[in-house]
Amino acid sequence: GAGVSQSPRYKVAKRGQDVALRCDPISGHVSLFWYQQALGQGPEFLTYFQNEAQLDKSGLPSDRFFAERPEGSVSTLKIQRTQQEDSAVYLCASSPGGRPSAKNIQYFGAGTRLSVL
Amino acid sequence: KQEVTQIPAALSVPEGENLVLNCSFTDSAIYNLQWFRQDPGKGLTSLLLIQSSQREQTSGRLNASLDKSSGRSTLYIAASQPGDSATYLCARSNDYKLSFGAGTTVTVRA
């Protein structure tokens, strides 16, 4: 079956532009996560959805970052007025379980590489 | 801010040698510890997941151990192959989110 799909794979934006990054999770997965990975670093948690509810957005760097998952499947991460420090790979992951569990594996997409000039 | 530390940052070995990758974490109250592989330009692939109640997990040539009391996990890769060249990341979870180390980049020379 299909894995987690992210689009676009690459995005170049001029500073100040708004961008929208899309994530299609594995069908039926309840949980969805966004992570930000800077060059040479591990991914950093941004936000977490359980179905359509955004239960944790504590990792979003600023109020320019906004994420939604209106129907509990596809999610969009929007960055307004992009800055150079927003340049990173944005990874989406999904997990079948809706509750924290020691058995929950997160399945990752290939990511969107954002470059802000 | 990294709560998870991986040493070494990079490793180069000849084909056939065993690999030992280290991961340490500061909070022993974890649900699980996961090891991922990341190839350039690609996402993360889960290799092994060790639940907090377990001491180790094995899959083929891979074996991962977990010592919660010392806050350490080790990934062993036996008889390395050039195809094992990648970045290996460990991540701990104490609820739903993962906290990652910066990774160890492995090069296996043919």
Image (cartoon, coloured by chain):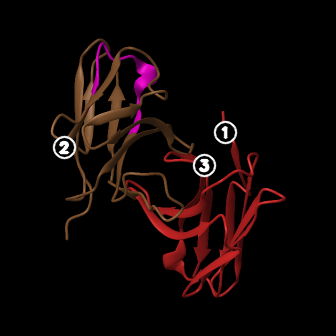
Do the dots labelled 3 and 1 sit on one chain?
yes
User: Helix, strand, or loop for circle 1?
Assistant: loop
User: Residue flagged by tag 2: what amino acid is it?
Assistant: Val
- How many residues crowd around disc 2 within 10 Å: few (fewer than 14), some, or many (20 or more)? some
According to the picture, the residue beneath numbered tag 2 turns out to be A74
State the residue at coordinates (53%, 79%): B82
Chain B: colour as depicted: red
Where residue B76 appears, x then y in whole percent?
Answer: 68, 77
Of badges 2 and 1, the one in the foreground is 2
According to the picture, the residue beneath numbered tag 1 turns out to be B2
Where residue B96 appears, x then y in whole percent?
Answer: 49, 47
Q: Which residues are magenta?
A: A77-89
Chain A: colour as depicted: brown
Q: Residue A69, located in which quarter of the rendered image?
A: top left
Q: Is residue A25 left or right of residue B109?
A: left
- Chain letter of mark 1 equals B
Residue that extends furthest to the left in the rendered view of this protein: A71
Residue that extends furthest to the front in the rendered view of this protein: A99
Do the dots labelled 2 and 3 sit on one chain?
no
CB under 8 Å between discs 2 and 1: no
